[in-house]
Amino acid sequence: MLRFGESIRLTELDRELFARVAASEWDAPTSVGDYNRRLELATKMWSGGTSPGALLLAQMARDLMLDPADPADVLGNRPIGPTLSS
């Protein structure tokens, strides 16, 4: 993912991950706000499920959201999901 302020451009791998987690076939988002809004919708959609897979997708959608106040926050610069502390 490339980011400049509010604008983002997803790599092919990022687009595939986003489409699967967000269950979306729309064009890839081009702004942090749109990216986070669509992941928030996915979180709500998957949170209503009862299967472990649906709940995992809800957590993944939350974890993929970007910090709008941190222009350095992109997928390539941080781990996805919880990290183990030493």
Image (cartoon, rainbow, N blue to C red):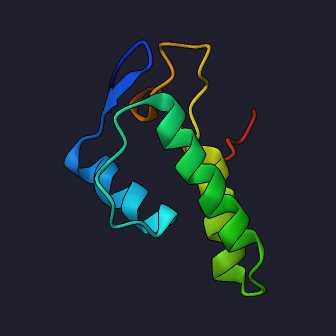
In the rendered image, the vertical position of residue 30 relative to residue 77, given as above or below:
below
Q: Foreground: 78 or 19? A: 19
Count the marks: how many?
0
Residue 78 seen by the camera: no
Q: Residue at x 33, y 60 (%)?
A: 26
Which quadrant would residue 43 be assigned to in this image?
bottom right
Q: Residue furthest bottom?
A: 51
Q: Position of residue 46 (x, y in %)?
A: 67, 72
Q: Position of residue 23 (x, y in %)?
A: 46, 70
Which quadrant would residue 7 be assigned to in this image?
top left
Q: Foreground: 24 or 64? A: 24
Q: Position of residue 51 (x, y in %)?
A: 72, 87
Q: Residue furthest left?
A: 12
31 sits left or right of 40 in the view: left
In the rendered image, the vertical position of residue 60 relative to residue 11, given as above or below:
below
Residue 28 seen by the camera: yes
Q: Residue at x 71, y 81 (%)?
A: 52
23 sits left or right of 58 in the view: left
- Image quadrant occupied by the N terminus: top left
Q: Position of residue 13 (x, y in %)?
A: 27, 52
